[in-house]
Amino acid sequence: MMDSLAQTAASLAQSAGLWGYWFALFAALAETVFLLGLFLPGSTLLLLMGMLAGQGFFDLFDLLFFAIVGATLGDNINYFLGRRYGRHWLREDRWFLKTEHVQKAEAYFDRHGGKSVFLARFVPSVKEIMPFIAGMVGMERRSFMTWNLLGAIGWGFQWILPGYIFSQSLSLAQTWLSRVGILVLVLVFTLLIFYVLRWSILRFGPSGFQFLRSILKSVGAALRQNPDVVRLIRRFPATTIFIRQRLDRSRWLGLPLTLTGLTGLYILALFSGLAEDVITGDTVVGLDTRVNGLLASVRSPFFDHLFYTITSFGYWPVVASGTVALSGWLWYRKQGSLILPLAISLVSCELLTFLGKLAFHRPRPDGGVLDPSGFSFPSGHASISVAFYGFAIYIAMRFVRLWSTRINLLMLGLLIAFLIGFSRLYLGVHYPSDVLAGYLVGTLGLVLGISATYISPAHVHRIGLRFHVAPGLKLTVAVVGVAGVLVMSLMFNVFRVPDLSVHPALAKQTVVLSASPQSILKGRETYASSILGIRRAPINVLFVARDIDQVRACLIRSGWREADPIRWHSVPRAYFNALRGTDYPTAPLSPWFWNANPQSLGLVQPGQQGHVFDRGYLRVWATPDKLDTGGRLFVATVGQEKRPGWHVVPQPLTSFNLARQDLNAQLKAGGGANHITEVSYPETPPTNSTDGTLPYDGLISLVDVGPGC
């Protein structure tokens, strides 16, 4: 219905031509004339015409001019009627002029004077009668004309510009939605996880922690009363004293240092294992590359600027200003003993990050939105997001008593760390393993900082961190620090923002000899894989075409259908239809990767009726390579997939060779190819990564797409 209404409005606007502008003038006139304005929705009509202007049916400024003229004429008609007949109609109590309407308008006029004509233009039920009242009370004509013209201009912009901007935004959304839909789903799902986690902790946290504490106390009491433990205590008194000192909660060298040491060793073990996987493990490196390629495919100008704004809060000038502000605030609140732990958290984090980058020398990903210097592993932004913002959240939690407020602060800290880390992934300057390593380093720095808060004030005083300074100077330091944060954030997001509209260049184009086009697979992947690196299917088709649109036209001509893009509504619709047993012939294809890039084009052939995910698939990847004859090369995989009852994602069947032969027959029958030849792989044919066998004959169909497509 909405589509038909839009088409009807567009056709009327197209046929109206210049008369459409006069219609806008009449709509504005009718909206403001004394009686008509109470019944005709002129503002709604102008909103619709603004949307049509956004689609190119009207010129925006001409439309604004006619609407402003119409509104000005309407108000002047009201002014004339009020000046000539206002008192007479009011005495006769005409049905269209009620005393309460006049009293409401007169009260508004008394409060705001002459400018009430301008302000009333934006107040419903007042704008229609205010010019009438202005004429009735004898307002000077020149003053009325001035305020009336200004109000008409503002009113025209108020109703036409939103429609125009909405129409432009809708076109932009349609351009980018297919690319960012999956990113929006990931962000919404992550926020949902944070909400569920917060709700669970608020709901079950107090009782759960109390239960755990009682269990630990019971276990401790049972151990102390155990005869064997008692004998060990008597046999090794020195060891017993050492353990008791390590568990002493009243001394920093006791339980705080013990927990810090154990936590630090655990974090270092995790970091060492992750670093080993990065150096020697193909699985982690492959996952890093695929996630980087997936995020590169969903970038858009809006998210580029959004995540640059988020990542700017991890740059050192912003963090340094925030440190000064936080230190000044602690100093002002007479909590100077927390400044040293803050410094320990930051210095240890930065030192460990620097040593990690120096030790591993891991290069940054290619093709990112930004082009930063330095090495990639671990991520400095991720580490500082935990060490600095985490410690700031910890300090805030010390000043509140309510359990719910503390949990909200904890969730806020986790969300800040997640967003800064994810921004580094989105902008293409870090791999997931870099961000995870940065979180570990930042957590270690945060643990050291929190542990240092258990140092008694006497120790801090001996170190020399307590200074007696006037409260006014302390407040000045805090205010200057906060101002520094604002200035630095503004600088990075306004004055020093890079040109995010220019992405790094694509891979260099290579020319392949027409005698062996399959050589483009030499040194590259010969299979398509999932985001986790699981090999799904062999690359068994090569297309030679002018561009990907020609490939699409050729396949559609041969009976294939283009799959819907992954959007917030298309994926739920596919599963909902699968549960109901109804058809969805163009259900989205799950993303597969070749050379870390998701498919450029996905097509399907529906199978049995009512089985949404039992179908043929054809995934195509564009390459920067071309033949010496001029045609561009596209790699593809064709096969069948089916979703078993216990699988969420459809699984490929092993009939790759049969599917390739069927595709050859379809292309020949549909006239979509000049000629098709079968060529062999330049290297070892692809095999399954789990059992080493893949039912495939090792041939590739080389399809020269016909010019008629």
Image (cartoon, rainbow, N blue to C red):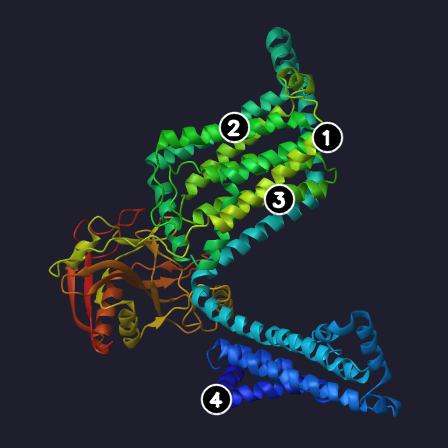
Between circles 2 and 1, the one closer to the viewer is 1
Q: Residue 347 carries which label?
A: 2
Front position among marks 1 and 4:
1
The residue pinned by badge 4 equals 17
Lower sequence index among marks 3 and 2: 2
Q: Upstream in the sequence, badge 2 or badge 1?
A: 2
Quote the CA–CA distance across marks 1 and 3.
Answer: 33 Å
The residue labelled by disc 1 is 471
Percent x, y of residue 528: 31, 55
Q: What element carries label 4?
A: loop
Between marks 3 and 2 in the image, the one whose residue lies nearer the viewer: 2
- Measuring 47% from the left and 90% from the top, which residue is drawn there? 15
Q: How far apart are marks 2 and 1 (CA)?
A: 27 Å
Secondary structure, mark 3, is: helix
Of labels 4 and 2, the one closer to you:
4
> In the rendered image, which quarter contains the N terminus?
bottom right
Q: In this view, does 593 lie above or below 559?
A: above
Report crowding for label 2: few under 14, some 14 to 19, many 20 or more residues within 10 A (C-alpha).
some
In the displayed structure image, the side of residue 329 where residue 359 appears, left or right: left
Q: In this view, does 618 lie to the left or right of 269?
A: left
**Amino acid tagged 3:** Met
For the residue pair 395 and 465, the one nearer the viewer reads as 465
Kindly check if marks 4 and 2 are in contact, taking CB atoms under 8 A apart as contact.
no
In the rendered image, the vertical position of residue 557 relative to residue 8, given as above or below:
above
The Cα atoms of the two marked residues, 3 and 2, are separated by: 25 Å
Q: Earlier in the sequence, mark 4 or mark 2?
A: 4
Determine which residue is flagged by label 3.
411
Percent x, y of residue 163: 56, 74
Tell me which label, 3 or 4, sits earlier in the chain. Answer: 4
